[in-house]
Every structure is written in structure tokens, then in C-alpha cells.
Image (tube, rainbow, N blue to C red):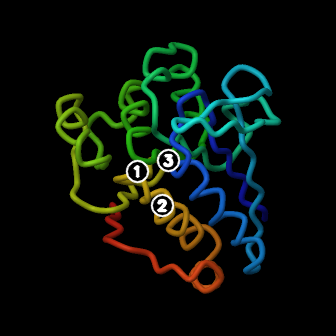
């Protein structure tokens, strides 16, 4: 069965937060995994301008329930103030989508109420805010609480994606990705029981 992953793109998204996971997921296919990755935009297809000015054409509008995993990269805080995005994040998780946040993208998940009372992590500069908003902050590179998976700093998106490949496609596919990328997962993956 193919693992369907969406990466939510928006103006101000941090390049590494989005492209790191995209790269891992692309290499997972080369390593024998059945993964389909789609860049999606909240309102409609179109161009986004990333945090450092990189422009990316996003071919698909976000349909919150039409995926298995949704990755929300960090970068800007505009999504925190978008009630439609927040409502659709809740809708996605209620429909069985695994919602994953990278870096400050976790604070968007927090604004939607998805981290309240749950183990989670974010960029070290945002951990106090995450805790103040009700998240149970865990000091780990990646925190897997079932249908909520979160990762710390900017480069942790690579580790989050490698963990999702391990979890959903198997360790041999993840090892193949590590070999292709010449990268080894770093830090601790904390898992709920």
C-alpha cells in the first residue's frame, strides 16, 4: 500500500523544513518504499515564496483528509492566524491523518489545539511557548505520539521524515535512504507506548 504524504507549503515556509523531508521521501521511493509525496498549498495551487526568498510552484491545493501523513513545516507564523488552516488541521487529524510538525510548524499545530496535553517538541526557542500552550514538551529530536509526530529544530525535518519512513515503510527502506543521502538519523526518537 502506498504511503501518501502531503507537505503544506505557504509564503514564509522555511526551505529546509519542507525540502529536507521532501528529499527523504523522494529517496525512500528509490530505496524501495511505496511513497507518494505532494506539495500542497492551503487555498489553491500557486507559487509560494519561502523564508529566504526561494520561489516554489505548488501544484496542488490542500485537501486535509486526502492523505495519510501531513507535514507542517515551520518558518512564518501566518498559519497560526489562519482560522481555516487551523480548522482543517483538526479535521485532518479527526479523519485519521497523522499530523507531523517540523520546528516552529509545531506551534501551528499548537494553535489548532492538537498538542494540548500531548507529548511533543519544537525548536528550542519555541519550547517555552509550546509548554505554555499546554503541550507536554519532551527533549527529543523527534516525538512520536501516534497520530501526532513532532520534531525539533530546522534540520530535524530530515530526521522526522526518516522516522516516518522507518515507521511506515520499514527499517530497511530507511537504511537505504540513509545510504543514498549519506546521512544517519540523529538524536532520540521518543515514542509513546
Q: Which of 15 and 54 is in front in this view?
A: 54
Q: Does 13 sit above or below residue 170?
A: above
In the picture, measured across the screen, residue 43 lies left or right of residue 81, that is right
Question: What is the secondary structure assignment of the residue under circle 2?
Answer: helix
Instruction: Specify which label sits upstream in the sequence, 2 or 3.
Output: 3
User: Pointers 2 and 1 in contact (CB under 8 A)?
Assistant: yes
Q: Position of residue 6 (x, y in %)?
A: 68, 45
Q: Does 35 sit above or below residue 55?
A: below
The residue tagged 2 is 160
Question: What is the secondary structure assignment of the residue under circle 3?
Answer: strand
The residue tagged 3 is 100
Q: Distance between the residues labelled 1 and 3?
A: 5 Å
User: Pointers 1 and 3 in contact (CB under 8 A)?
Assistant: yes
Within-10-Å neighbours for mark 1: few <14, some 14–19, many 20+: many
Q: Distance between the residues labelled 2 and 1?
A: 7 Å
Question: What is the secondary structure assignment of the residue under circle 1?
Answer: strand
In the picture, measured across the screen, residue 102 lies left or right of residue 152, that is right
> Which residue is pictured at 51% across the width and 28% down the height?
90
Q: Position of residue 88 (x, y in %)?
A: 58, 24
> Which residue is pictured at 72% across the width and 65% down the height?
26
* Mark identifier at residue 150: 1
Amino acid at each position: 500500500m502506498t504511503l501518501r504524504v502531503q507537505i503544506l507549503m505557504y509564503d514564509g515556509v522555511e526551505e529546509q523544513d519542507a525540502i529536507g523531508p521532501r528529499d527523504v521521501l523522494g529517496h525512500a521511493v528509490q530505496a524501495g518504499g511505496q511513497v507518494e509525496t505532494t506539495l500542497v498549498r492551503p487555498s489553491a495551487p500557486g507559487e509560494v515564496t519561502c523564508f529566504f526568498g526561494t520561489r516554489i510552484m505548488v501544484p496542488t491545493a490542500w485537501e486535509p483528509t486526502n492523505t495519510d501523513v501531513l507535514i507542517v513545516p515551520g518558518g512564518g507564523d501566518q498559519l497560526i492566524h489562519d482560522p481555516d488552516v487551523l480548522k482543517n488541521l483538526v479535521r485532518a487529524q479527526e479523519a485519521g491523518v497523522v499530523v507531523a510538525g517540523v520546528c516552529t510548524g509545531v506551534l501551528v499545530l499548537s494553535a489548532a489545539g492538537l498538542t494540548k496535553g500531548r507529548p511533543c517538541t519544537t525548536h528550542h526557542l519555541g519550547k517555552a511557548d509550546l509548554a505554555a500552550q499546554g503541550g507536554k514538551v519532551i527533549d527529543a529530536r523527534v516525538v512520536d505520539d501516534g497520530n501526532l509526530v513532532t520534531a525539533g529544530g530546522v534540520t530535524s525535518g530530515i530526521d522526522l521524515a526518516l522516522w516516518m519512513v522507518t515507521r511506515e515503510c520499514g527499517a530497511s527502506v530507511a537504511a537505504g535512504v540513509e545510504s543514498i543521502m549519506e546521512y544517519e538519523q540523529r538524536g532520540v526518537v521518543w515514542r509513546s507506548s
